[in-house]
Amino acid sequence: MRRAALLICIFGLLFSVTFAQAKKKPKSKPDAPSKFAGKKAGEGKELVAGMKFRWCPPGAFNMGPDFDAIPVTLTSGFWLGETEVTQGQWKKLMGTEPWKDLEAVREGDDHPANHISYDDALAFCGKLNEQERSVLQEGWSFSCPTEAQWEYACRAGTTTKFSFGDDATKFGDYGWYEKNTKGENYPHSAGAKKPNGWGLKDMHGNVWEWCSDWYEYKRIGGINPQGPKSGKERVYRSGCWVVDAEYCESAMRSDDLPTTKSRLLGFRVAVVFSGK
């Protein structure tokens, strides 16, 4: 009996010490991405004056068309511009007008900036990082989205051809394309059409949008894919105002040299977490 009582006392003492140590153990700090993250998919925030962004949470999806889709997992959420970068936003930051006096341009602050190369888009993001550092948490930066981030945001949780379903006859409600811009040879007002499920507008049509990946015919999936390490051409997504709906599907992609400036090319800014 004495031995049993002694063992009970010893175990009780050990439990008390362990419990006390557990109480004193400091709480682990939240990881860096969570400090700047949105609370739900599609949450809107004006991170820069005149530029609204939408939150795209971490998640998994199948990238590409059904017959050739590959699994992708994005472990960090990101913010993506609600619309393409507009002429007004470009002029305010860069003080230039790359589209001035060129073909297929209708000037207006709410029209997408076109005749923009990938290198131009990168310069825009670089200047945002210099001037707007105070709005970002450590480890976050302005950038062109990766191809995987772009398609994930475009789909907004859907698995259909378009973010609004498979019915191409509804396209005119969600984007500018060949059928609703006849005789109007220029990109149209950004954000004038219905948004996808996460509040992002013009993800289909209007202007093609540069992504940060080097182009490779075979898509690269997996965890947080960045595309090939090198290449000659960059990927762009979304379709544009001069093509039919099939060229504006969520999985559609194309490519060109990063120095290419075209009436069909613009871009959208992402805010991404890359660590310290």
Image: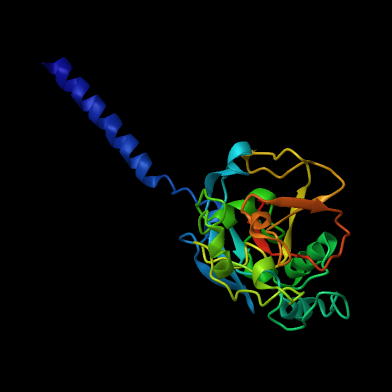
Counting from the top left corner in percent of width and height, residue 100 is at 86, 80
Q: Coloring scheme of the render?
A: rainbow
Which residue is pictured at 68% across the width and 69% down the height? 84
The extreme left residue here reads: 1
Counting from the top left corner in percent of width and height, residue 267 is at 73, 64
Can residue 71 be seen here? no
Which residue is pictured at 19% across the width and 21% down the height? 6
- Which sits in the foreground, 89 or 239? 239
Q: What count of labels does the image hold? A: 0
Q: Quadrant of residue 201?
A: bottom right
- Which sits in the foreground, 122 or 156? 156
Counting from the top left corner in percent of width and height, residue 244 is at 68, 60
Which residue is pictured at 58% across the width and 51% down the height? 152
Can residue 194 be seen here? yes
- Which sits in the foreground, 112 or 24? 112
- From what the image shows, is residue 76 above or below residue 242? above
- From what the image shows, is residue 31 above or below residue 21? below
Tell me if 97 is positioned left or right of 4 in this view.
Answer: right
Counting from the top left corner in percent of width and height, residue 232 is at 87, 47
The quarter of the picture where the N terminus appears is: top left
Q: Quadrant of residue 11?
A: top left
